[in-house]
Image (cartoon, rainbow, N blue to C red):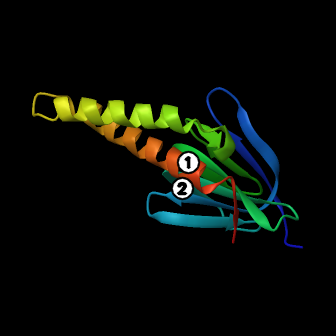
Amino acid sequence: MAKSVLLEVITPSKLFYKDKVEMVIVRTLTGEEGFMAGHTWACKLLDVGVMLIREEGATDFKAAAISGGYIDVRDSFVIYTDSAEWAEDIDIDRALKEKTAAEEWLKSHNDTSTDPNHIDKAKISITKQITRMNLAANGARRKK
């Protein structure tokens, strides 16, 4: 059995996850990275993407969509993110509606008079919804 480490995933509204894990894989700003017990100290910015967690003693990964944030890797791991959602809790219809609304807004506001921050937020929203829909469609657990 591999060594385990405490992982906490914290959103502004709740403690999303807290348990012992053997590995966590997240999308950083430079690509996917995995972290295991004994990893050297690291603090990495996270991108919108899928977080994979292999719990202590498990053979497969639990998957959740997260919306950026950062991971602090020490004796335990803490992920701070604006939102986290298990694959089975994702409403695909709602995600599709939100994606469509962001795309429509972008089409009608993609000019030089629109605040670039608002354009960036719309693009991030589209990325979040695509991530959520893909995760929901591909299932909650993945073998690695």
Q: Can you see residue 109?
A: no
Callout 1: 10 Å neighbours few (<14), some, many (20+)?
many
Amino acid residing under circle 1: Tyr
Q: Quadrant of the C terminus?
A: bottom right
Residue at image coords 35%, 35%: 100
Query: Is the Cβ of the residue at disc 1 closer than 8 Å to that at disc 2?
Result: yes
Residue 86 in the image: above or below residue 62:
above
Residue at image coords 9%, 33%: 112
Residue 94 in the image: above or below residue 144:
above
According to the picture, the residue beneath numbered tag 1 turns out to be: 70
Give whichever of discs 1 and 2 has the lower sequence position: 2
Label 1 SS = strand
Amino acid residing under circle 2: Lys
Residue 28 in the image: above or below residue 129:
below
Q: Residue 44 shows which numbered tag?
A: 2
Q: Is residue 47 left or right of residue 15?
A: left
Q: Is residue 39 left or right of residue 28?
A: right
Q: Quadrant of the N terminus?
A: bottom right
Q: Residue 12 shows which numbered tag?
A: none
Q: Where is residue 103, by image quadrant? A: top left
List x then y, in percent, for residue 19: 83, 49
